[in-house]
Structures are given as structure tokens and as C-alpha cells.
Image (spheres, rainbow, N blue to C red):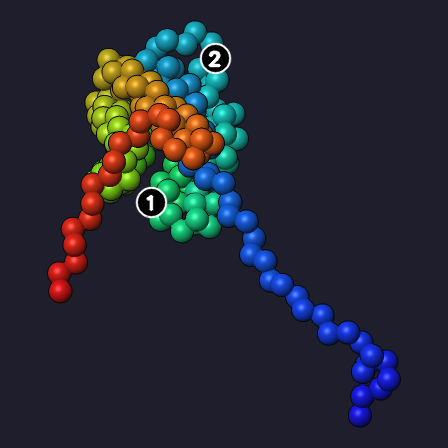
Amino acid sequence: MATTFESARPVQQTEIVGAPAPADPAPLGLAAFALTTFLLSAHNAGWTKGTGLDWLGYALAYGGTCQLLAGMWEFKNRNVFGATAFSTYGGFWIGLGLYVLLGVPHATGNMVTNDLGWILLAFFIFNTYMLLWSLFVNKAVLAVFFTLEITELLLFIGNFAHTANVVKAGGIVGVVTAACAWYTSAAGVVNGMAGRHVLFVGNPLSFPAARS
């Protein structure tokens, strides 16, 4: 039996409102990747004259942590390509920074270049299939993965062969990679703000139609 208080209580209707869609995290991930890649590539090219570790803090904080966060937000957006790319390369920068801090001080002889050769070879393998799938994203992203493919190829060959000139060439191509990533990030920011294509990114290829 309902009490007087319960029977007098007005019926309230609650409207369930979904959370607003998150902003596109890709421009952040690309910017973080671009800046850290630029700093390390300038060092590899022999252009910097400082400690040679100017990139390290930014590898951990910006290229690593911020890019990893962008990858996690891409999972929220159900963007499997962006989530995989940003999370992996965010982990790459964090791992490389930790290797420099924890592994390099204990290395002797050619241990560091051998280690870097294997690390870069592993990421070259990963980048190869991501390069193929970037064909289905847009041409700007394709340019990032294509130049990164050449960068990693030159760097792992240069480190395995202990050839400074090949590493320098990899550094120069790495600067081009950073420029491509910065452009793609800038395009993502302004195109998202305007709600239309202000900067060119190019159309993706279409996946083949499923066979019946």
C-alpha cells in the first residue's frame, strides 16, 4: 500500500543525453610525432650542435605521452588505423627514451648501434603494413608513412652497417617526414575548425567491394 507521501510524489521523466563527441585527436598525435621526429632527425643529420639529447624530454612527454593519449582517444572514435598508429609510435618514443636513459649508459662498443638497428628494423616492419593501409586514409597520411618508411630503412641500414653518412641521410629524410606530419596536422586543425577542406589532404582509395 502506498503512503500519502509516495502517492503525492510527482512522476519525473529523465532524459538521457549522450556525451558530446570528442574532438579529433589526430592533429595532436601528428603534431607530437612531427616535433619529436624533427628534433631527433636534425640530430641524426648532424645539424644540431648541443648536447644531442634535446629530443629526449620531448620523446617522453610529447611524442610519447601525448601521442599515446591521441591513440587512446582514437579508440573512442572507433578509428582503428589512428588508434594503432598513434599508440604504437607513442610507445616507440617512450621506449626509445627509456632505452637511452637505462640502456645506453651500460653499453660498450657497437652495442648501441646494433640495438638501434634491430629496434628500427622492427618498426620498419610495422610501418610497412601501415603504409599500405594508409592508402585508404588520404594522400597526406600516405606521405607521412611513405617518408617514414624511407627514414626507418636508411636508419636501420646505417646503424647495422655503422655508416654515418647513411644515418645522416636518414636524418634528412626524417626532417621531410616531420614536415609531412606537421602539414597533415595543420590540415586536420583548420579543416576541422572550418568544417570543410581548407588544406588539401587528398582522397583515399576505396576498399574493393565484397564478393557475394
**Drawn side of residue 154 relative to residue 87, left or right:** left
Q: Quadrant of residue 103?
A: top left
Q: Residue furthest left?
A: 211
Looking at the image, can residue 167 be seen? Answer: no
Between 119 and 125, the one nearer to me in the picture: 125
Disc 1 crowd rating (10 Å Cα; few below 14, some 14-19, many 20+) is some
- Spatial separation of the CA atoms under disc 2 and disc 1: 36 Å
Q: Which mark is residue 81?
A: 1
Residue 71 is situated, as x and y percent measured from the top left of the image, at 44, 42
Give the structural element (helix, strand or loop) at label 2: loop
Quadrant (top left, top right, bottom left, bottom right) of the N terminus = bottom right
Q: Are marks 2 and 1 in contact (CB under 8 Å)?
A: no
Give the structural element (helix, strand or loop) at label 1: helix
Q: Which mark is residue 37?
A: none
Residue 94 is situated, as x and y percent measured from the top left of the image, at 46, 35
Between 141 and 71, the one nearer to me in the picture: 141
What's the residue at 55%, 49% (across, down)? Answer: 20
Disc 2 crowd rating (10 Å Cα; few below 14, some 14-19, many 20+) is few
Residue 11 is situated, as x and y percent measured from the top left of the image, at 73, 74
Mark 2 highlights which residue? Answer: 51
Q: Amino acid at mark 1?
A: Phe
What's the residue at 41%, 31% (across, down)? Answer: 191
Between 100 and 30, the one nearer to me in the picture: 30
Looking at the image, can residue 172 be seen? Answer: yes
Residue 68 is situated, as x and y percent measured from the top left of the image, at 46, 40
